[in-house]
Image: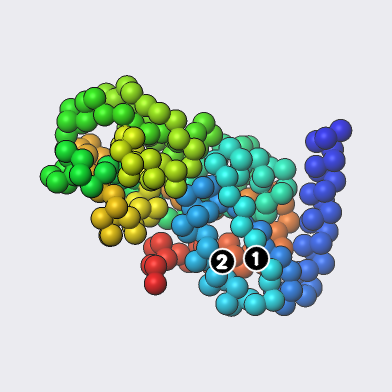
Amino acid sequence: MLEYAKRVFLLADEAVAAIRQVSGLQTGTLVAGGTTTVGTYLLPPLLAAFRDRHPGIEIGIRTGNGQQVERGLVDGEIGVAVLAGVPTAAQLVSEPILEDRLVLITQPGHRLAGAGTAEPGELAGERFLIREPGSSTRDLQEQAMETWGLKDRTEIWGPETIKQAVAAGLGVSLVSEHCVEQELADGRLAAVEITPAPKPRPIVLAHRRDRLLGPAEQAFIAMLRNLRAWPRKT
């Protein structure tokens, strides 16, 4: 019964979207989902630019880890989302829009911070701070740990908490380069280049393949498709 109820609500949303096709982009709502890193560091400037173009549209952001955002799309709670990594749910369609590079971060006074580069063997004995289950970043962190031969790890929920934990000396971690731009610039954290470096991960837009998208969602998708780089901070 729960699944039937979700489908009823999804159909109701599509009925509203169909009606709004007539009124265009004068009024309406856009709720965009984003995985934690993307939702925190990419969506706000994009939605601010979207609102400037369409001031009559109400804007909302829903963030969560990869599993949570996929579930929100499948259940119809989110119309369109931007995710780090490709979603796996069969009901979703996705396409790449950008790439995201992960960097190893340490305390500024860490033994490896001065050199700026290191071999995997030089990480021996380091404690690795890893994201929570369901995070797409965690998948890449685990791959890196296996490649680099690291064993000791501590689970930390969320990129902001990881940054604070690294700065406090609890360990090292692998995070999106975009979530530590300010901390690297002002010296609160340091980045170390490791060879081989993790491959960049795709940033994709996704929505239900059977969902009728409203004018605001369609316009936002068109905006995402025209992206050539992450928005620069002002």
Number of the label disc, if any, that sits on residue 36: none
The answer to whether marks 1 and 2 mark residues whose Cβ atoms lie closer than 8 Å is yes
Residue 123 placement: quadrant: top left
In what quadrant of the picture does the C terminus appear? Answer: bottom left
Number of the label disc, if any, that sits on residue 59: 1
| 230, above or below 84, in the image | below
- How far across and down, in percent of the image, does residue 131 sit? 45, 36
N-terminal of the pair, mark 1 or mark 2, is 2
Can residue 57 be seen in the rendering of this structure?
yes
Residue occupying image coordinates x 45% and y 35%: 156
Residue occupying image coordinates x 41% and y 62%: 230
Can residue 146 be seen in the rendering of this structure?
no
Q: Amino acid at mark 2?
A: Leu
Pointer 1: residues within 10 angstroms few (<14), some, or many (20+)?
some
Residue occupying image coordinates x 34% and y 35%: 170
Q: Which residue bears the numbered disc 2?
A: 47
Residue 223 placement: quadrant: bottom right
Of all residues, the one furthest to the left in this rendering is 115
Residue occupying image coordinates x 27% and y 42%: 106
- Using the numbered discs, state the Cα–Cα distance from disc 1 to disc 2 in whole angstroms: 7 Å
- How far across and down, in percent of the image, does residue 157 sit? 49, 38
Kindly state the secondary structure of the residue where label 1 is placed: strand
| 212, above or below 198, in the image | below
Residue 105 placement: quadrant: top left
Q: Amino acid at mark 1?
A: Ile
Q: Nearer the viewer, residue 11 or 78?
A: 78
Q: Nearer the viewer, residue 84 or 44?
A: 44
